[in-house]
């Protein structure tokens, strides 16, 4: 695949583990659900590298017929001028162009059968721009980049490709399984320092709208809302943080950490966004509002199990459909 | 079990459980956490991903989706059990010896613009810059953790005669190699970044190299001794791209 035009686009996967004790962040895709569904649609194993598009127009050419899917939010896609829908697998034929144009703020994923096959660095292909690790030499994509992809589909991929080459061969994910990005409610469970905050602040956390500021990036979202006051003023020894951690900075505002979160942080952690809601939080537009809803960690884990069940079932049904 | 009493175990996410050990911060307690960390990495349970060690805690990261697909209906409960089963291996006759720690001699130039806050630190302690340098180079510092940025080692614990509060407002750009003090900690900035530590010198050595298979000069548990050099020696030894 050759990149002809791009804004900020990076190679991402499920992130980098095994190097946290060297201070190397996990990184990886912002919207794990859209990323995962993209890989499922093109018959990839979990964790195959995809492209994450976050701003600017994008276009790429393909020198052999490729099985591709677009997922996530923010873009609309065209193959050599013909519109193409998100959340469905499609073929881009040899010599055709795939173009994506931004229509709103968000992260879109371009999954390709076999995955992007750049050299992994520290167990992952994910690009961490601040430290220039992963991706292609630690950089975002540039026009002219050639991305290594597999020319030879595996059996699963071949079945999907055969189906799509038929005249009426189309399949699309049901809206029941794709994320509802308009949902304002983000669920969380109390973090280790939840009790450090006054009762009033803990109430405010659940009863007020928070707004996403414009200085948000892949490292974290700065939220604007009521000032959260602490009851305990001792300094926290640096503790581990991860995507979804809700830190409260000294000015009483929430920093919601995202995919490129550092490994440790010294601000108290008032909460942790439940893992199934992180994709929804990640796709929030600057200025838009978030309403936090408290649940228990037990409930959060049950939500995760429920989603994994759905995904396993979907995977089974999807591949069965083509075989 | 008396053993488990001194460990405080609590989940911080669906995919991470923290084990806190002891009260306050000590090298002895940290060695216990290092031992535990080594056990997790050598004897990995299903779904294990990584650990993060800090001053007083070790956090275990795992993949709950993988554990569920392998039949675990509460990945958190499963990992909690895995943690409990490994705690006895940190003491008594079950104890596994710790991997060898590194000893590093790090040259530092404590002169001029490489030490913008040296006077402030000396002033805070009502002493001369020379005695701050002497104290900073007089003993080994212990590496407790690496975090904040890739390769940033948190070392300590500084005696009261060196411990100095952070700056009221962070410097916008701290050059790579800068050696700083914040409270009872001392550390080296691996790359240029904003930072709030009091900068008392700069090392010509690169402490993090992303192109290396083993990118970090230090690891938790290592010991570091600083030694003063002059600025011509700094330039001669300099490994940073933009001095």
Image (cartoon, coloured by chain):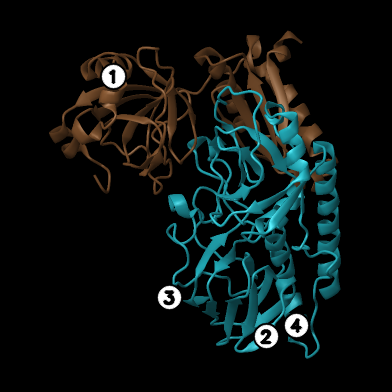
Chain A, hue in figure: cyan
Q: Is residue A9 left or right of residue A197?
A: left
Q: Which residue is mark 3?
A: A144
- Disc 4 or disc 1, which is closer to the eye? 1
Query: How many dots with numbers?
Result: 4
Q: Is residue A177 left or right of residue A193?
A: right
On screen, residue B195 above or below B163:
below
Along the polypeptide, which appears first: circle 4 or circle 3?
Answer: 3
Which one is in front, A248 or A118? A248
Instruction: Give the class, few, some or many, for how many residues have Cα within 10 Å of label 2's Cα (few <14, many ≥20).
Output: few
Labels 4 & 3 near each other (Cβ < 8 A)? no
- Percent of width and height locating residue B68: 81, 45
Cα separation, mark 2 vs mark 1, equals 68 Å
Tell me, for residue A289, which label it has, or none.
Answer: none
Residue at 41 percent across and 34 percent down: it is B196
Q: Which residue is mark 2?
A: A83
Q: Which element is circle 3 on?
A: loop
Q: Which residue is mark 1?
A: B123
Cα separation, mark 4 vs mark 3, equals 29 Å
Cα separation, mark 2 vs mark 4, equals 16 Å
């Amino acid at each position: 695949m050759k990149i002809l035009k791009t804004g900020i686009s990076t190679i991402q996967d499920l992130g980098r583990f095994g190097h946290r004790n060297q201070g190397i962040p996990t990184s990886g895709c912002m919207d794990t659900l859209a990323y995962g569904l993209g890989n499922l649609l093109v018959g990839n194993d979990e964790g195959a590298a995809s492209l994450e598009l976050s701003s600017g127009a994008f276009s790429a050419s393909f020198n052999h017929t490729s099985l591709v899917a677009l997922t996530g939010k923010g873009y609309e896609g065209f193959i050599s001028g013909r519109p193409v829908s998100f959340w469905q697998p499609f073929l881009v034929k040899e010599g055709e162009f795939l173009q994506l144009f931004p229509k709103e703020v968000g992260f879109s994923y371009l999954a390709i059968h076999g995955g992007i096959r750049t050299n992994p660095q520290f167990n992952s292909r994910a690009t961490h721009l601040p430290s220039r690790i992963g991706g292609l030499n630690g950089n975002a994509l540039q026009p002219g980049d050639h991305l290594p992809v597999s020319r030879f589909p595996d059996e699963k991929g071949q079945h999907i490709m055969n189906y799509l080459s038929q005249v009426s061969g189309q399949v699309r994910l049901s809206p029941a399984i794709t994320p509802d990005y308009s949902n304002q409610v983000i669920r969380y469970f109390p973090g280790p320092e939840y009790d450090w905050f006054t009762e009033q602040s803990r109430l405010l956390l659940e009863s007020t709208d928070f707004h996403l500021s414009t200085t948000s990036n892949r490292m974290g979202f700065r939220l604007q809302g009521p000032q959260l006051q602490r009851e305990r003023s001792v300094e926290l020894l640096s503790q581990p943080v991860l995507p979804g951690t809700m830190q409260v900075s000294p000015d009483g505002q929430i920093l919601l950490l995202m995919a490129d979160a550092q490994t440790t942080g010294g601000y108290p952690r008032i909460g942790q966004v439940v893992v199934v809601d992180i994709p929804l939080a990640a796709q929030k537009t600057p200025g838009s509002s978030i309403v936090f809803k408290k649940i228990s960690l037990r409930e959060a884990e049950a939500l995760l199990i429920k989603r994994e069940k759905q995904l396993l079932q979907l995977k089974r049904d999807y591949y069965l459909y083509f075989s | 079990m008396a053993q488990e009493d001194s460990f405080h175990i609590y989940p911080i996410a669906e995919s991470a459980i923290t084990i806190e050990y002891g009260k306050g911060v000590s090298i002895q307690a940290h060695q216990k956490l290092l031992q535990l960390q080594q056990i997790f990495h050598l004897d990995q349970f299903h779904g294990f991903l990584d650990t993060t060690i800090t001053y007083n805690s070790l956090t275990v990261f795992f993949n709950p989706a993988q554990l569920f697909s392998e039949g675990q209906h509460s990945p958190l409960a499963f990992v909690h059990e895995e943690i409990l089963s490994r705690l006895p291996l940190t003491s008594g006759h079950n104890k596994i010896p710790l991997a060898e720690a590194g000893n590093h001699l790090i040259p530092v130039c404590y002169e001029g613009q490489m030490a913008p806050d040296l006077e402030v630190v000396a002033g805070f302690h009502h002493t001369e810059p020379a005695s701050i340098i002497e104290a900073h180079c007089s003993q080994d510092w212990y590496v407790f953790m690496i975090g904040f940025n890739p390769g940033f080692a948190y070392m300590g614990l500084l005696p009261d005669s060196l411990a100095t509060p952070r700056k009221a407002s962070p410097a916008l750009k701290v050059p790579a190699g800068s050696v700083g003090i914040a409270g009872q900690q001392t550390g080296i900035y691996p790359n240029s970044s904003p930072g709030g530590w009091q900068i008392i010198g700069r090392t010509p050595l690169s402490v993090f190299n992303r192109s290396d298979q083993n990118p970090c000069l230090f690891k938790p548990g290592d010991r570091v001794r600083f030694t003063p050099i002059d600025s011509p020696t700094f330039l001669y030894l300099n490994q940073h791209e933009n001095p």
